[in-house]
Amino acid sequence: MMNKEPGPAIRATGLTVVRGPRTVLRDLGFTVPAGRVTGLLGPSGCGKSTLIRAVMGTQAKVTGDLHVLGRPAGHPALRARIGYVTQAPAVFDDLTVRQNLEYFAAVLDPGRRAAARRRENVTRAVADVDLTRHADALAGNLSGGQRSRVSLAVALLGTPELLVLDEPTVGLDPVLRRDLWDLFGTIAADRGAGLLVSSHVMDEAERCHDLLLMREGGILAQDTPDALKTRTGTDTVEAAFLSLIDQAAEAESESAAGAARSRRQESPR
Amino acid sequence: MTTAPLSPARTAATATRVLRQLHNDPRTIALLLLVPCLLLLLLRYVFDGSPETFDGIGASLLGIFPLITMFLVTSIATLRERTSGTLERLLALPLGKADFIAGYALAFGTLAAVQSLLTTGLAVLGLGLDVTGSPWLLLLVALLDAVLGTALGLFVSAFAASEFQAVQFMPAVIFPQLLLCGLFTPRDQMHPVLEAVSDVLPMSYAVDGMNEVQQHAGITGDFVRDVLVMVGCALLVLAVGAATLRRRTA
């Protein structure tokens, strides 16, 4: 994987998603490179989770071209190659942390012969999210932050080539957030895995290699944090994001006003 | 790797996981195992003056208990999987739908076997239930009922958005079968329309099967028919239940 030039982990063109009467994602085009951490940022309700579910192949009514690790999104062969964390922690509350991980590990890497490898993987994943002391506690008895870490640990089992994480650091304390972002960077650098991490916390954006900024179901910008700051003449990603949003809103109101003007001119009265 | 319709290792892992969840919830296990026994005990002394009535109703109930309890447990358990996001996560992993369903059927089937052993044992040995045929055949029918209950529970959980709705499916799906299965009055004495309806409801065959064992020494042709219908029904409903597990949702 290291000697061959890897293709992008995710490539989308003309990606559109309809939910009920609403078009949630409209004609998106973007790439998520391998070996880098890509941050997916935008206000809540802008379509981040829908985009992530489309990538995972769990979203219905997806049109356009969406390739993940070289295959169409949702292809069965992808299921063992992607680590996925949903926004709400998806773990069994009536199992202990270790029992949860043992089950998901057995689904990923089944069979008696893999038992030793699974044990190793589980122990490592528990340590990665700093839950070793709570390994034998029921997930339902843990705090919210601890439960989301169990959910994250599930995604870290095995050696996924792509990690798709929907707001994995919500509700975590600053020390743990820093440690997890360090871990994300290590996974990208050492394993060459691609990471797509959604967040609405802008200071986390500085830790990403690339950023996808979303607004109202569209991609506002895709670039590195530095390039975005330079382009907008700002000091922080947050300021850059706000400036881009204002520009977009201005352009929209201008074109709306222009359209209204031209409608008035065309109308016979 | 993911092309095989059923992976024995993943099915076993799923069954182990479901049993571990139950193991961490001892009160549910106690209720599942003890309540049917207590109800049988109650029934025995309700019909203290007419043991023949107890023989008839008791045998039928041995078939009905596992169906009802497994229906309830499965519908709630799979509803929780759907609403908590664990089902979405599992289906995004290399877990086949058949692994998921067979895992549940295996885990709850095991529990049902223990439950049926206790109730059948209590009824035959402790409460003097008069069975002409082999008690093992009673056990076989009880197990099939449990699998049928698991299948029905899995199926209806697809149509419930909350635990409130799931519990309401019990009167909707189970009670009509209870009324029509021949427990209260022989099916051939019902209105012909109802008799025809009862002919297509699986619980009727559960009760018929139990009565065959209760009244006949050997394995009768009717008993074989009842068992086959129940197996077919369980497989059919499980297959339909599998179709309700969607990898892609809106």
Image (cartoon, helix red, strand yellow):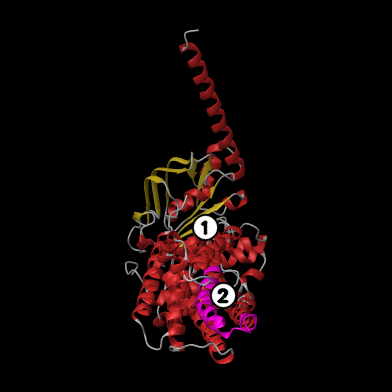
Specify start and end residues of the magenta stretch as a single range: B43-72
Alpha-carbon span between mark 2 and mark 1 = 26 Å
Q: Residue at x 61, y 59 (%)?
A: B164
- Give the number of the mark in front: 2 or 1: 2
B39 or B232, nearer to the observer: B39
A179 with respect to B182 (left or right): right
Task: Classify mark 1: helix, strand or loop.
Answer: strand
Q: Tag 2: residue type?
A: Gln
Callout 2: residue from which chain? B
Q: Is residue B71 magenta?
A: yes
Above or below, B220 against B148 in this view is below
Find out whether residue A64 is within the magenta segment. Answer: no
Residue A236 seen in this snapshot: no
Q: Which label was assigned to residue A165?
A: 1
Residue A105 — which label? none
Residue picked out by circle 2: B21
> Which quadrant is the N terminus of chain B positioned in?
bottom left
| Residue visible at 58% across and 41% down in the picture | A241
Q: How many marks?
A: 2
**x and y, in percent, of residue B243 in the image:** 40, 60
Q: Residues within 10 Å of mark 2 (few under 14, many from 20)?
A: some
